[in-house]
Amino acid sequence: MKFSEMTQDSWAELQLYLDTCLIPYTALRGNQSPVDATEALERLRDFLDLVEIPFKGRIMTYPAFHFEIPEMSMALNTVCKQLKVSGFKYVVIMSSDGRLDKEQMPDADLILLRSDIVQNVEKNEIPRYIGEKIRELWKR
């Protein structure tokens, strides 16, 4: 579910079930052409579908961080901390192109970087792998 689909009344009703927040990270550097930026957003969209579609009803997708900045890992960690204060139990960060320093992100419960996953998991196994990671998160 996207944050923009939520009303005040539906949030009060669904907050107990929507315990996981998803933060997309595009990792644009500002030097991409419009075509390259579009392709990056499409890669991220396709990667997010691996979580948003099978886990709809439990995960709330928040606005994406599109541009890479110095200290991005620390900035995203601050957002994770604030989202937990606002009521989310889990915060997941997903990026199809970005690199993040996971050690600087103790408040992120799960960081899924497509570039790391494709190095270790067969392409046809990626949806299953991501599903397992999400379910493991909820079992903790």
Image (cartoon, rainbow, N blue to C red):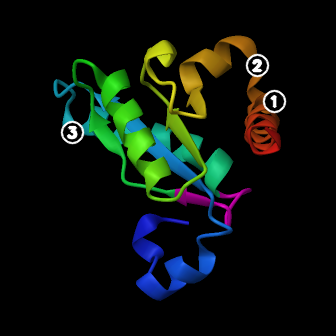
For disc 2, the neighbor class at 10 Å (few under 14, some 14 to 19, many from 20) is few
Residue annotated with mark 1: 125
In the picture, measured across the screen, residue 73 lies left or right of residue 54, that is: left
The tag earlier along the polypeptide, 3 or 1, is: 3
Q: Residue furthest front?
A: 85
Point out which mark residue 34 bears. Answer: 3
Residue 73 appears in the rendering: yes
Q: Is residue 55 magenta?
A: yes
Query: Real-space Cα distance between discs 3 and 2?
Result: 31 Å
> Regarding mark 1 in the picture, which secondary structure is present there?
helix
The tag earlier along the polypeptide, 3 or 2, is: 3
For disc 1, the neighbor class at 10 Å (few under 14, some 14 to 19, many from 20) is few
Pointer 3 and pointer 1: residues touching (CB < 8 Å)?
no
In the picture, measured across the screen, residue 80 lies left or right of residue 10, that is: left
Q: Percent x, y for residue 40?
A: 38, 35
- Can you tell which quarter of the image residue 55 is in? bottom right
Pointer 1 and pointer 2: residues touching (CB < 8 Å)?
yes
Q: Percent x, y for residue 73?
A: 37, 23
Residue annotated with mark 2: 121
- Region of the chain picked out in magenta, as a range: 53-60
> Regarding mark 3 in the picture, which secondary structure is present there?
helix
Kindly identify the amino acid type of the residue bearing the numbered disc 2: Val
> Regarding mark 2 in the picture, which secondary structure is present there?
loop
Pointer 3 and pointer 2: residues touching (CB < 8 Å)?
no
- Can you tell which quarter of the image residue 115 is in? top right
Q: Is residue 104 above or below residue 130?
A: above
Kindly identify the amino acid type of the residue bearing the numbered disc 3: Pro
Q: Percent x, y for residue 44?
A: 47, 40
Q: Which of 62/96 is in front?
A: 62
